[in-house]
Structure formats: C-alpha cells, structure tokens
Image: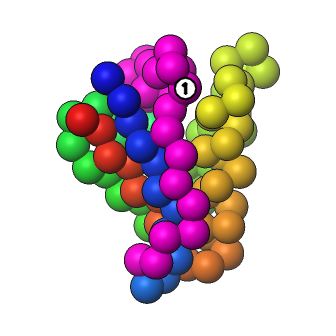
C-alpha cells in the first residue's frame, strides 16, 4: 500500500511531492491516531486534503508525537506542512 503526499500552494500548484516510507510509517501512525484527531482522517484508500487552517492543528498533533515515533517521513510531512501554511496552501494525501 502506498500513500503520496503533495504540498500545494493557494492556487493548488504543486510545491513538492513525496511518498510514505517503504514500511508505511506515516499511514500506520495515522491508523493508530485517536478518532478525534486530524491524523485519523487521512484515508489509506482515497484522497484527503488539509487546508492551511487545518494544518495548524495537524502540525500540533505531529509535534506532540513521542520522539521515538517521529520517523523520517513523519518529520518530512511536518516540515512540508509549514510552507503550506505560509503560502495558504494545502497538504494533499493520495492513497491507493
């Protein structure tokens, strides 16, 4: 199973794109997230988009993860959310 992550600006122009790790660490972290979190809303089979307002909360959720759960791809998603916020953009997740 794979998950692609797109960073888009306000006009939906693509800024960056990357995929989950080979072991699907980002998707697995989302699957374990509480139902009330934004992370739980990332679909493994479908499309999920968070706007810049939602990304503030999403960043807080990722930053609150225990250090041992912060895999390189989760850190990359966190790093990608920040320019998306600055450009009033989006993170767009595409699962297969």
Answer with left or right where residue 1 lies relative to residue 61: left
Of the pair 86 and 12, the residue shown nearer to us: 12
Which residues are the magenta region? 12-32
Q: Position of residue 1 (x, y in %)?
A: 32, 23
Is 73 on the left or on the right of 66, as rendered? Answer: left
**Up-down relation of residue 24 to residue 11 (above or below):** above
* Residue holding disc 1: 21
Q: How is the image coloured?
A: rainbow
Query: Quick check: 18 above or below 62?
Result: below
**Does the image show residue 85?**
yes
Residue name at image x 71 percent, y 51 percent: 79
Instruction: Say left or right for 31 vs 76.
Output: left
Q: Does residue 33 show up?
A: no
In the rendered image, residue 15 lying in the magenta stretch gets the answer yes
Looking at the image, residue 6 lies above or below residue 75: below
Residue 11 versus residue 26 in the image, above or below: below
Q: Position of residue 75 (x, y in %)?
A: 70, 37
Q: Measuring from the top left, give residue 51's x and y in whole percent.
A: 44, 67
Image quadrant in which you'd find residue 46: top left
Q: Position of residue 49 (x, y in %)?
A: 36, 58
Dot 1 alpha-carbon crowd within 10 angstroms: few under 14, some 14 to 19, many 20 or more: some
- What residue appears at the point 60 percent right and 39 percent down from the top-left corner? 61
Residue 31 magenta-highlighted:
yes
Q: Residue at x 29, y 38 (%)?
A: 95
State the image quarter where residue 27 is shown: top left
Depth order, front residue of 83/39: 83
Q: Residue at x 46, y 78 (%)?
A: 13
Q: Nearer the viewer, residue 16 or 82?
A: 16
């Amino acid at each position: 199973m794979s998950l692609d992550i797109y960073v888009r600006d306000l006009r939906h122009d693509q800024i960056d794109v990357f995929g989950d790790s080979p072991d699907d660490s980002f998707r697995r972290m989302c699957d374990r997230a509480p139902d009330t979190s934004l992370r739980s809303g990332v679909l493994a089979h479908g499309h999920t988009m968070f706007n810049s307002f939602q990304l503030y909360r999403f960043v807080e959720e990722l930053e609150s993860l225990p250090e041992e759960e912060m895999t390189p791809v989760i850190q990359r998603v966190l790093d990608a959310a920040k320019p998306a916020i600055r450009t009033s953009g989006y993170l767009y997740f595409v699962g297969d």
